[in-house]
Image (cartoon, grey):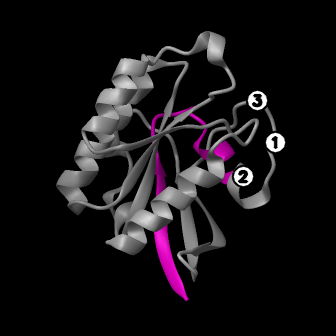
Amino acid sequence: MLQKKVCMLGASAVGKTSLVRRFVDRMFFSDVYVTTIGVRVDKKTLQVNGQDMTLVLWDVHGDDEFEKVRVSTFRGMSGYLLVADGTRRHTLEEALALSNRVAETMGKIPGVLVLNKADLKEQWEIEPDREAALASSGWKVLRTSAKTGEAVEDAFSELAKAMLAK
């Protein structure tokens, strides 16, 4: 069985932990934000192209400065979900800057860009043109909602397929 280390990356309060909880436990625990301290590790096995793959999910504490996240956390990483909060435009720019630092440190590894909190449509700040431009530049971009479960399985599945293809 394949085992792949996946890091959840993004600024604070974008929903990284909630996405992991939704994916692993199929639950949304609360609208109340709880800070992840350090790293929380979970596992889930899924089928990818007829093959079992265990994702070892590293839920890395949200930080607005990559330098504060230990680079050692990323050793052995096979892929990552880059998470931004669709209701806070600046978290997308922070996520993209983080992605650039990961590429500089780790080289090219698979990543999926997740725009979380799709259930809050009336508060959405990221323009469709920006999403389309990111998709055109090579990102797999998905709108997700940890609260409703929208596209959460798809995000992890797309990342698993990309890691298997690499």
Q: Is residue 72 at all visible to an observer of this figure?
A: yes
The residue carrying mark 2 is 21
Observer-side mark, 3 or 1, equals 1
Region rendered in magenta: 1-21
The kind of secondary structure element at disc 1 is loop
Looking at the image, is mark 3 or mark 2 nearer the viewer?
Answer: 2
Element at badge 3? loop
Q: Which residue is mark 3?
A: 32
User: Which amino acid type is marked by label 3?
Assistant: Val
What is the C-alpha distance between the residues marked 3 and 1? 9 Å
Quadrant into which the N terminus falls: bottom right
Question: Amino acid type of disc 1?
Answer: Phe
For label 3, the crowd category at 10 Å Cα-Cα, with few meaning under 14, some 14 to 19 and many 20 or more, is few
In the image: residue 32, left or right of residue 41? right
- Mark 1 lies on residue: 29
Q: Image point 30% across, 61% down: which residue?
A: 109
Please, what secondary structure does the residue beneath circle 2 have? helix
Provide residue 19's location: percent of width, then percent of height. Answer: 64, 46
Q: Which percent across, then down, holds residue 69?
A: 38, 49
**Is there CB contact under 8 Å for labels 1 and 2?**
yes
Where, by quadrant of the figure, is residue 35 drawn?
top right
Binning the other alpha carbons within 10 Å of mark 2 as few (below 14), some (14 to 19) or many (20 upward) gives: some
Can you name the residue that lies furthest to the top here? 122
Q: Position of residue 162 (x, y in %)?
A: 40, 64
In this rendering, would 80 be left or right of 27?
left
